[in-house]
Amino acid sequence: MAYYGFIMEEGEQQNNGDNAPYLTIGELSRAVKTAVEAAFEFVRVRAEISRPNKAPSGHLYFTLKDDRSTLAAVCWKTMRANLAIQPEEGLEVIATGRLTTFAGQSKYQIVVSQIEVAGEGALLKQLEDRRRMLASEGLFDADRKKKIPKMPAVIGVVTSPTGAVIRDILHRLHDRFGVHVLVWGTLVQGRDSAGQVAAAIRGFDVMPEDGPLPRPDVLIVARGGGALEDLWAFNEEIVVRAVAECRIPVISAIGHETDTTLIDHAADLRAPTPTAAAELAVPVKTDLAAFLGEVDARLLRSCAQKMESAHQKIAIAASGLVDPADMIQGRAQTLDYALGGLFRGLDLWLSVRSVRLSDLAGRLNPPEAKIAKAEGRLSQLVQRFEQQLATSLSQRQQKLGNLVKLLDSNSFERVLDRGFALVTNNHGVPIKRSAAAPANAAVTIQFADGARDAVLGNHAANLASTETLKPRPKKARKQAFDDGQDRLL
């Protein structure tokens, strides 16, 4: 009987009565891992794939589930390239691997080394899901289809180089019409077949026009019949995309007439069998020769009918033609009549114009008369202008003399002649009021015969001395005024 113990928290004492040994978590995890891997070293599990996820490291993580339970699954990066199919959501598979534990999360998981589809129903479901996905991208649209050339010079064939398919294709091509055939041998079944087929299609597509090998005008991707699993390589996404992206027209010939793969939808033409693909790629030589002979005969008959019709049209046209000599003579006579009429009309026209010109010349005045008349009018205008100018100048001079007299009579110098004087400050500004002249101000007094500088006295003292004077006779007042002016000066 096995005993399992646990590590106690620090400071906790072990029961004195319990001597059972304990294990660390790491020891217990390793023991569980050893027991699980020894008991389940090889297992095969049928389940449905859920939540597939590719990690940045390259490992695949997903979950296997049925109606009751789930199982974590991992496929290491080194094993992922060996998987026959890639995990997809909802796909029912049989996963082969071994059970192990993951101590980091205290769980067990299966390390998957191989995956196969569980039954034809699951394959059909996967096939339908993939078909809908690729169709939604437009890879199967009819407007993307390219026309198959009628007479290809080079045909590329992608198939197994050792199977009966390539022999049937070469035999049928030889019977129908001789063309150059390039065969790119690949696997057509198994894990690596899809990659080889896709690589062959892309290899043909990148061949240069002027390379050492001629570039194919059309490709045939062929395989014999088989079960759905046998034809699965031609349902892989990598092959379908290679066919859809190929710039060379592609004929798909996979299996029998009842077999349908996804590349049949992406190809430019689907053949029911590989032999039928060869028949669709090139015409029958005898049929082509017969067709060319018939076309040649029809061409000869058509040319003969065209020539006969042309001869008839020429004859009908010739019957309606006039003799060129008669036509030229008739046209010459018509020209003579026209020239005669032209000359007569010209003479009449000139006569009419001459009469009208004579009439107009009689009505015209000589230029000399017009010039003499214009000179007379010009002399009258000059005489009138000179008279008007002299009168105007006399009036302007008289008016100017009146203005000069008026200006002289109103000049301040005439006022000075009457005994008045003009008092200005040292800036030449007239002083009109006594309030504007302060005491002891330097002023200039302008008389009629010249100017004198003066200094103003006290206004109040002069006023007081004036008030003490008694009335004097007019002659005395004039004398006093003159004396005051002398004192002021």
Image: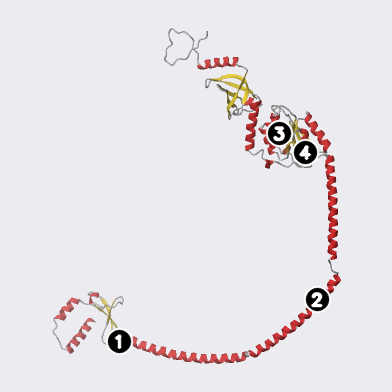
Q: Residues within 10 Å of mark 3 (few under 14, many from 20)?
A: some
The kind of residue on which mark 1 rests is: Arg
As measured in the structure, the alpha-carbon distance from the residue carrying label 2 to the one carrying label 3 is 87 Å
For the residues labelled 1 and 4, say whether their Cβ atoms are less than 8 Å apart: no
- Vertical comparison of 216 with 404: above or below: above
Q: Which residue lies under the disc numbered 4? A: 281
Q: Which residue lies under the disc numbered 3? A: 199
Question: Could you say which is closer to the camera, residue 399 or residue 413?
Answer: 399
Which one is earlier in the sequence, the residue at label 3 or at label 1? 3
The kind of residue on which mark 3 rests is: Ala
Q: Which of pointers 4 and 2 indicates the residue nearer the eye?
A: 2
Q: Could you say where residue 186 lies in the image, as x and y percent from the top left?
A: 74, 30
Label 2 element class: helix
Label 4 element class: helix
As measured in the structure, the alpha-carbon distance from the residue carrying label 1 to the one carrying label 2 is 113 Å
Q: Could you say where residue 334 lies in the image, as x and y percent from the top left?
A: 80, 76
Label 3 element class: helix
Q: Which mark is residue 334?
A: 2
On the image, which quarter does residue 227 sit in?
A: top right
As measured in the structure, the alpha-carbon distance from the residue carrying label 1 to the one carrying label 4 is 138 Å
Which one is earlier in the sequence, the residue at label 3 or at label 4? 3
Q: Residues within 10 Å of mark 2 (few under 14, many from 20)?
A: few
For the residues labelled 3 and 1, say whether their Cβ atoms are less than 8 Å apart: no
As measured in the structure, the alpha-carbon distance from the residue carrying label 3 to the one carrying label 1 is 132 Å
Q: Which residue lies under the disc numbered 1? A: 414
The kind of residue on which mark 2 rests is: Thr
Please tell me which residue is depicted at 64% across the width and 32% down the height of the picture: 128
Please tell me which residue is depicted at 68% across the width and 31% down the height of the picture: 235
Q: Residues within 10 Å of mark 1 (few under 14, many from 20)?
A: few
Q: Could you say where residue 203 lies in the image, as x and y percent from the top left?
A: 72, 36
> Is residue 55 found left or right of 470 in the rendered image?
right
As measured in the structure, the alpha-carbon distance from the residue carrying label 4 to the one carrying label 2 is 73 Å
